[in-house]
Amino acid sequence: MRRREFITLLGGATASWPLVARAQQPERVRRIGVLMGLAASDPDASGWISAFEQVLQKSGWSEGRNIKIEYRWGTGDARIIRAYAAELIGLAPEVIVTRGSTASRTMQQETKSIPILFVAVSDPVGSGFVASLAHPGGNITGFANHEDTMAAKWLELLKEIAPEITRVAVVHDPGNPPAPVFLRAIDAAASSLGVQLTRAGVHDAAGIEQAIEMAAREPNSGLIALTDVVTNVHRELIIRLAAQYRLPAVYTFRYWATSGGLASYGADVLDQWRGAASYVDRILKGEKPAQLPVVQPTKFELVINLISRPPKRSPSLFRPACSRSPTRCSSRPSFCCSACVRFWHKAAGCCT
């Protein structure tokens, strides 16, 4: 080979090296923080996380290849939630997903620059998370749970289950920002339904036991459990005590019924986590939280637990009409059993 030809060949090979090197470089790994107010052992949280990660993967984001998701679990303890919020911020993620009002409020207080995406927050405007649903402003947006009108539906459903009820205890964490909104709505509906309302504020398991025991002492009593970090962590206790004292009870989400609760009516939580993944995708691609409107739920579920022990005074209502348990009712009553259809028509105003 002539010297000139050799130099030309060597020069062409050298020029190609940067191209090969660029092609072999791994993708940039983007960090996502997730702050959950619940414990990692929560029986339903794994399903939410799975739905979240599946949508991310469909959008081209894979754990270990181009994203790293940092999960932190607050176990219902405000001090732990705050510590984990600070820890996640120290990792400098490009977006942080928070579940529930307590975790979302804590994270909002900790950072004004990192994008925050909340899931399962009720009344985000009234609670001060965003300026408006259409134009959130700041560094936070997300997926709302319920409007205040839902609270009246819970009481109506409870009266439909057990018409003889005259007293209802509403178990809730008084420190949860949306709680006053729902309590006012339930109170407003109570007078027209002939019900006396008791606001049972609780902070821990002992408070829950005391509140439900006191409610059970009064005749013709029922129970509504609002969803917050305290009641969520102790939901199995609440469900067990309601069954023990034979209190008809209505809950706010499907996972209460799948955990053994009598009946629930609320937004489809899995649908919200899927939506959260789509918003994370948009934020990682450059959109700002202030530009992304808060999403109100459009899909609701009415779930009747047909194998739950019925209240003593209304056994006929829960005689199984189908083999499925619990039964899921959303915007298609043709898929429900006859008992659920009766409830669906009562609550259908929230589904249309």
Image (cartoon, helix red, strand yellow):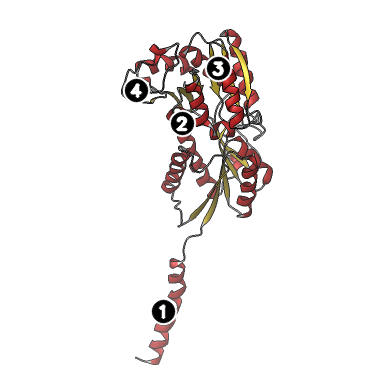
Say if 245 sits above or below 89 in the image: above
In three-dimensional space, the C-alpha distance between marks 2 and 4, rounded to whole angstroms, equals 19 Å
In three-dimensional space, the C-alpha distance between marks 1 and 4, rounded to whole angstroms, equals 66 Å
- Where is residue 266? Give x, y as percent: 49, 26
In three-dimensional space, the C-alpha distance between marks 4 and 3, rounded to whole angstroms, equals 35 Å
First along the sequence among labels 2 and 4 = 2
Kind of residue sitting beneath label 1:
Ala
Residue under the point 50% across and 19% down: 245
| Front label number (1 vs 3) | 3
Q: Which mark is residue 216?
A: 3
| Front label number (2 vs 3) | 3
**Secondary structure at numbered mark 2:** helix
Kind of residue sitting beneath label 4:
Phe
The residue at which mark 2 appears reads as 255
- Where is residue 335? Give x, y as percent: 34, 23
**Secondary structure at numbered mark 1:** helix
* Left or right of 23, for residue 208: right
The residue at which mark 4 appears reads as 335
The residue at which mark 1 appears reads as 13
